[in-house]
Amino acid sequence: MSITLFVPCDSAALAAGADAVVDALHKEATARGLTIDVQRNSSRGMFWLEPLVEVVTAAGRTAYGPVNFQDVPSLFESDFLQGGQHRLSLGLTDALPYLAKQQRLTFARMGITRPLSLDDYAAHGGWVGLQKTAAMDSGDVVQTVLDSGLRGRGGAAFPAGIKWRTVRATEAAQKYVVCNADEGDSGTFSDRMTMEGDPYMLIEGMAIA
């Protein structure tokens, strides 16, 4: 019986040694005659816990972190594949205080899906907006965005609907959709995390635009 684990492939996790942890997990499982399926998900944004290893158990995803490749043998010794206790045990991921108090919108799929999996994206609400707007008039789409109060994520928080309305009203033979990202503010990594962790969301948004 194969047990599923999740280890992020986000840049922050990689910088903290996530690939080495994955290699160690495979080697230790093989040495013990165990079968594991390590999925590379996006980061949940708790960078102080990276590399974060999640194990799928009957109770839900159980988290351990921050995990160093040298910690892997002791994790197996503690039966972490069944949610066993270890000094790096964090409990159920969804119950972690940092996540439990949040209502995630832009980051709704972060840490849950594999970034480049179309199946994962579709299974977690992907393409619903595109399908809905495909049956709408472009003017109605723009008005919906205006009414929603959707704003840019930069410091100006400029209303997206105004941009869309302006572009729609502009006479031009050729128009372009540009996706820009900002990491200029110190300590902010939200745009990079979005591009790496949920790229199809950006593609869907651009397709709607």
Image: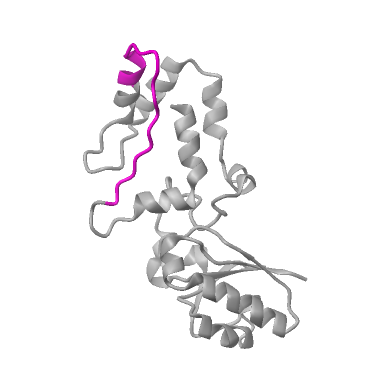
Q: Is residue 169 left or right of residue 19?
A: left
The stretch in magenta equals 165-183
Q: Is residue 180 magenta?
A: yes
Which residue is at 29% across, 51% downward?
183
Instruction: Between residue 92 and residue 141, name the one nearer to us.
Output: 141
Q: Main secondary structure of the magenta part?
A: loop
Residue occupying image coordinates x 49% and y 77%: 67
Position of residue 3 in the picture relative to residue 206 (left or right): right
Q: How many marks?
A: 0
Residue at position x 38%, y 71% from top?
Answer: 48
Could you tell me if residue 103 is visible in this image? no
Q: Is residue 31 left or right of residue 25?
A: right
> Which residue is farthest top?
171
| Image spot of residue 174 (x, y percent) | 40, 18
The image quarter in which residue 172 lies? top left
Q: Is residue 38 magenta?
A: no
